[in-house]
Image (spheres, rainbow, N blue to C red):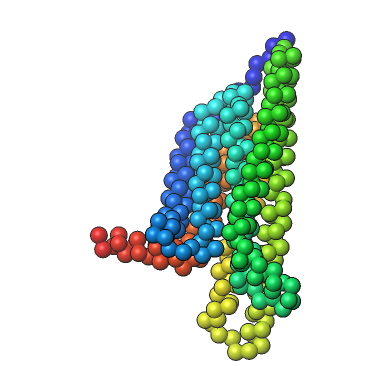
Amino acid sequence: MLTLTPVITVSYEVKTVFLVLSVLEFAVGILVNVFIFLVYFRDVVRRQPLSTCDLVLLSLSLTRLFLHGLLFLDAIHLTHSQRMNHLLSFRYQTIIMLWMIINQAGLWLTTCLSLLYCSKIVRFSHAFLRCLASWISRKISRMLLCTLLFTSVCTIICSWDFFSRSHFTITTVLFMSNNSEFNLQIANLKFFHSFLFCSVGSIPPFLCFLVSSGVLIVSLCRHMRTMRAKTMDSCDPGLEAHIKALKSLISFLCLFVVSLCTALLSVPLLVLWHHKIRAMVCVGIMAACPSGHAAILISGNAKLRRAVDSILLWVQSS
């Protein structure tokens, strides 16, 4: 017996509010990350040497631009889709999988930034750790290439898994075409499995990020204990460097955990429980997290702050 596909109804007011908030988040995210990208890209055009930190921030802003674009497409699809077979269409699943891959690339770049902070700020006492920190600071450009290679490998593996499961789902639908609700449940479960499979790629960079951030926290505590034993100077450059690095890394850690948890929650909300409004809330949180971290990066970076000050002076003078 043929069963109808379930319809998820959301009021017009909720759709309008969600779409307006999505447009604002998209505009703010694009504006902030385009600003970061142009500041460093201007140095590239002028053939001025970029530091390793500038190179990581340039790459990170570029990935964030793609991330905001995918999240905005996700929001538009959620707003205009009514039936479950439209809501979880192949196009929507592709957007989610691309978001997961680009989010992993951003995590690898932030891990490189965390390792760079450790190699530049932390003073290691062991000879092996000093050599390792020196090697990381010199090989950060190669680490970025390895990040690109690893992301490409993850893209190939996730794409193979996703398209193979999609082919299996289509074959199942052709052989069992009498029950559309059963076919929809099979497609949803296959997509959820592919999403979890691609999420596994975030574990190695996340562990590296936690270790490097923990080393910075231990180094900060040790530095403060040493300075407390001496005469504490309020303008201690070592303390300021530790605090700025930790502010950037801990904010990213909190925002990334929130973003990843909401992403992992949004998929079963649609796939298994059919709660569209809660999925919209999750997508809104996912879009706000990259913009918040970009704003924190601007406030903690001297070159970006000087660029903001020059823009504000130009606006006041004009």
Q: Which of the two residues, 118 or 241, is positioned nearer the viewer here?
A: 118
Residue 124 occupies quadrant: bottom right
The residue drawn where x is 44% and y is 66% is 303
Residue 236 occupies quadrant: bottom right
Quarter the C terminus occupies: bottom left
Residue farthest top in this picture: 1
Quarter the N terminus occupies: top right
State the image coordinates of residue 10 (x, y, percent, origin top left): 55, 30
- From this view, report whether residue 288 is shown above or below residue 156: below
- From this view, report whether residue 43 is shown above or below residue 156: below
- From this view, report whether residue 93 is shown above or below residue 47: above
- From this view, report whether residue 169 is shown above or below residue 39: above
User: Would residue 176 be found to the left or right of residue 137 on screen?
Assistant: right
State the image coordinates of residue 39 (x, y, percent, origin top left): 42, 58
Q: Which of the two residues, 283 or 191, is positioned nearer the viewer here?
A: 191
Residue 267 in view: no
Residue 40 occupies quadrant: bottom left
